[in-house]
Amino acid sequence: MASPRAPSRDVAIGVIEASEDRIDPFVVSHGVCGEQAKDAVAAVSAALTGGEPEMEGRRCLLLVPLFVDATRQKVGLWRALLRMMMEAV
């Protein structure tokens, strides 16, 4: 699984400086109907639900899964993506 990541964006939450990050872990797999890719992304989503990620020097305030998508890249090759938004201080 790879994690391409969009650049951080500074945001202000009241008087607190924070950053907003988009995280896009994805899985590429071979198989019928992309079931392996979908299952792997579902496992990542389940592990993050209710979790509190540890970050060096920062604290995660919000981690929201925005969407999950699975697309066929070519015959027998699937790519599943989980887009998340994270805010940290």
Image (cartoon, helix red, strand yellow):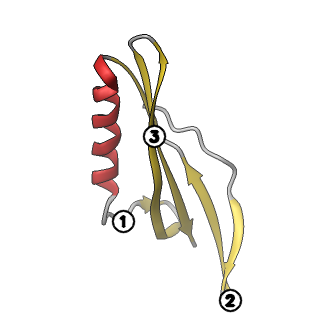
Q: What residue is drawn where x is 30% and y is 16%?
A: 31
Q: What residue is drawn where x is 53% and y is 62%?
A: 86
User: Is residue 47 shown above or below 89?
Assistant: above
Kindly identify which residue carries mark 1: 52
* Sequence order check, earlier mark of 1 and 2: 2
Helix, strand, or loop for circle 2? loop
Q: What residue is drawn where x is 46% and y is 35%?
A: 26
| Quadrant of the drawing holding the C terminus | bottom right
Q: Looking at the image, do the residues carrying marks 1 and 3 touch, with CB atoms under 8 Å apart?
A: no
- In the foreground, 76 or 10: 76
Q: What residue is drawn where x is 34% and y is 56%?
A: 48
User: Is residue 35 shown above or below 42?
Assistant: above
Helix, strand, or loop for circle 1? loop
**Mark 2 residue type:** Val
Kindly identify which residue carries mark 3: 69
Numbered mark located on residue 13 in the image: none
Q: Position of residue 11 (x, y in %)?
A: 70, 72
* Identity of the residue furthest to the top in this view: 75
Kindly identify which residue carries mark 2: 15
Q: Position of residue 62 (x, y in %)?
A: 48, 70
**Mark 3 residue type:** Asp
Helix, strand, or loop for circle 3? strand
Crowding around mark 2 (Cα neighbors within 10 Å: few <14, some 14 to 19, many 20+) is few
* Sequence order check, earlier mark of 3 and 2: 2
Crowding around mark 3 (Cα neighbors within 10 Å: few <14, some 14 to 19, many 20+) is few
User: Is residue 74 shown above or below 16?
Assistant: above
Q: Looking at the image, do the residues carrying marks 1 and 2 touch, with CB atoms under 8 Å apart?
A: no
Query: In whole angstroms, how far apart are the C-alphas of marks 1 and 3?
Result: 24 Å
